[in-house]
Amino acid sequence: MPTLRVDGVRVTVPAGATVLAAARAAGAEIPTLCHHEGLEPWGGCRLCLVEISKPGWTGEGKIVTSCNYPAEDGLVVRTSGERVVATRRVVVDLLLARCPGTPLVQRLAREHGIEEASYEVNPEPTDCVLCGLCTRACDRMGVSAIASVSRGASRAIAPPFNQPPPDCIGCLACAEVCPTGHIAWSEADGRRTIWGRVFEMQRCEGCGRPHLTAAQAGWARARGAAEQDLRLCDACKREQLARTLRAVSRGETVAAQAAAS
Ligand code: SF4
Ligand code: FES
């Protein structure tokens, strides 16, 4: 298990941990945008920069992205040195020029002492910070219905040819992981709409509420999901579990409790 020093604090982390994990374990606060515990590190937003060095290194330390840099034994990490903060400010400044009206970006700008962007402000402001969480979540599902398109200020996340994506299953993974709420979706009359596609919803057999799209249920079945896992919404599953546990604690058999419910 590697032992590092983060801002003077000695910390030991499991093998394979990142510098970001080590820094957080040491109590340091590092801003991140494209990092998500459930996804592979990407290193795209450059907000989590830190300075690293090792005893014996000469010259200045190296500026690296902490979310995908391995926590190596003996590493000395500075999370808020002058170079780190100055580089991070440039990243936030550029973000503010791209997304001037986005509350998350405005907060980051305030935290970095930036009142207004020093770069030319995007003539078509967007809430998309290009963190890539949505596309990576979609890829992780094995669906890959959306992707990053275009370049420069007009770079965006979109389905192929900006048409309703044929591969999308309407699972909302992209919308739920988006840190700015940029991905619009809606639900009404047993239908969910996202990326211009309309999905029929499947209703929970417990409470009758629509809880997943029929396309999503089909996708899960094709990957071996048991039918009983698709019948109930999360709230009803929790309720069923609570009922079962109550019955067990009263000494009833699970089968008797299931028959009574
Ligand atoms: S749509 Fe949201 S999750 Fe996707 S890249 Fe933009 S900000 Fe990130
Ligand atoms: S959080 Fe590390 S580069 Fe985005």
Image: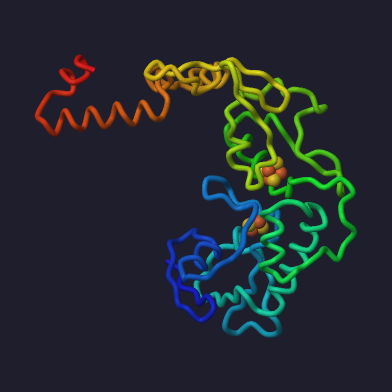
Residue at the (49%, 74%) spot, across then down: 4
Q: Is residue 161 left or right of residue 18?
A: right
- Give the image quarter of residue 145: top right
Query: Would you place residue 20 above or below residue 229 in this image?
Result: below
Instruction: Residue 206: give x, y in percent of width and height.
Output: 37, 18
Q: Is residue 219 left or right of residue 133?
A: left
| Residue extending farthest left | 251
For residue 183, say whether it is visible. yes
Q: Nearer the viewer, residue 192 or 137?
A: 192
Query: Would you place residue 213 above or below residue 62 in this image?
Result: above
Q: Is residue 3 left or right of residue 170?
A: left
Query: Would you place residue 214 above or below residue 157 in this image?
Result: above
Instruction: Residue 237: give x, y in percent of width and height.
Output: 35, 27
Residue at the (48%, 70%) spot, across then down: 27
Specify the quadrant that holds the C terminus: top left
Instruction: Residue 255: give x, y in percent of width and height.
Output: 18, 18
